Amino acid sequence: MEDEEPATVKELLAEIKDTSELAVYLAYSALMFRDRQIAEEVMELEDRIDELLSKLRVAVVLAARNVEDAERVRPILLIASAADRISTAAAEIAELLLRGMEIHPLIFDALENAEEKVARCRVSENSSLVSTSLGEADLESSIGMAVIAIRRKDGRWLWDPDDETVIEPGDVLIARGPKDGAVLLRELSTGQRSLTAIQEGAR
């Protein structure tokens, strides 16, 4: 996440959208991989959206100069409130893990067989992804997989990494995308496939 606080209604709404989307994918990741640390991040993302929603309400009020303006910006607040409900639902999913509730195996089967998968892949030293930035790898365009989190070799997490993030050996990538993309990402991560060959094949 950016350290600098967004100042405009547009920036606030964009961050609310991105954060609620990330919360959903991380919530399913937490369940899929039984990872409490990911679940705890979902709870923090929900708190972040609450903060952003409060700031958005203030920004919208300040931007509305009359009743007509207020009517025009009303849908913005409705969309933001809906995104807030989405993040609350994601937190409820994460809480299943945090509360130590027994999770029915059917849930894991459903997640495993869903059309869009959440994949976890460890990057080996001989992988062509090593020393490549996410922007250079452009995995979303070449194999349809978007990296939503990275766990470094030392245990640190990078949530919602940007294009400048460089992949290191030993990184664990959490990514979302189609089933065939998840297979390709695993092959890339283990060095079975070359990034250059896949990118050239995607052209």
Image (cartoon, rainbow, N blue to C red):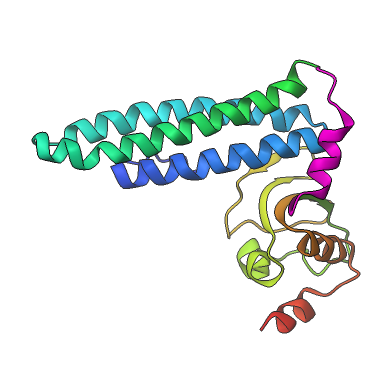
Q: Is residue 66 visible?
A: yes
Left of 97 or right of it: where is 23?
left
Above/below status of 52 relative to 140: above
Out of 150 and 179, give the one closest to the viewer: 179
The span shown in magenta is: 101-117
Q: Residue at x 81, y 17 (%)?
A: 101
Image location (x, y in percent) of residue 192:
91, 70
Is 63 left or right of 198, judged from the image as shown? left
Whether residue 105 appears in magenta in the rendering, the answer is: yes
Residue visible at 67% across and 59% down in the picture = 166
Q: Is residue 1 visible?
A: no
Q: Position of residue 103 (x, y in %)?
A: 83, 25
Q: Is residue 128 placed above or below 79 in the rendered structure? A: below
Residue 110 position (above or below residue 31): below
**What is the number of callouts on the image?**
0
From the top left corner, tell me how far across and down residue 147 is, in percent.
67, 54
